[in-house]
Image (cartoon, rainbow, N blue to C red):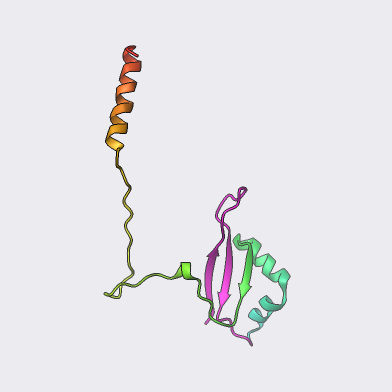
Amino acid sequence: MPRLQILELPEGIDDERPPFVLVIDQAPRDEPLFRSFREDMDLNDIVADRVGARAVLVFEDTIDIPANEVPIGPDGHPVCIRLEPDLTGWDDAITTAVTRARERVNGTR
């Protein structure tokens, strides 16, 4: 059965949203629709335009896009990654900003 994947591309200066390529893999060789995709570049352009992709790529083989892989932990569930900000020095920056604001309001600066 064919799969749909998204291959994200680097953003350009004028991009309103991240550009991508629609990748269809495991496409049956003998099915007319997928044969059309492989042979008719105008059809690819029409579909790409409708879904907002830069292009549509169709392959019979399996194409693995590493960015689309979800790491699985030893328990068999997807691995979740938690990002925590580095707030080193944040307290000092806030205290300094509050002190300066008070000085401006009180006219002592």
* Left or right: residue 30 compared with residue 104: right
Q: Quadrant of the C terminus?
A: top left
* Left or right: residue 51 compared with residue 107: right
Q: Residue at x 59, y 82 (%)?
A: 60
* Left or right: residue 67 compared with residue 91: right
* Left or right: residue 16 compared with residue 79: right
Question: What stretch of residues is rendered in magenta?
Answer: 1-30
Residue 76 versus residue 18 in the image, above or below: below
Q: Residue at x 33, y 69 (%)?
A: 78
Question: Residue lying furthest bottom in this view?
Answer: 30
Q: Quadrant of residue 38?
A: bottom right
Q: Please tell me whether the stretch drawn in magenta is mainly helix, strand or loop.
A: loop
Give the percent coordinates (x, y) of residue 51. Answer: 60, 62
Name the residue nearer the viewer: 101 or 46. Answer: 101
Q: Residue at x 29, y 23 (%)?
A: 99
Residue 8 versus residue 34 in the image, above or below: above
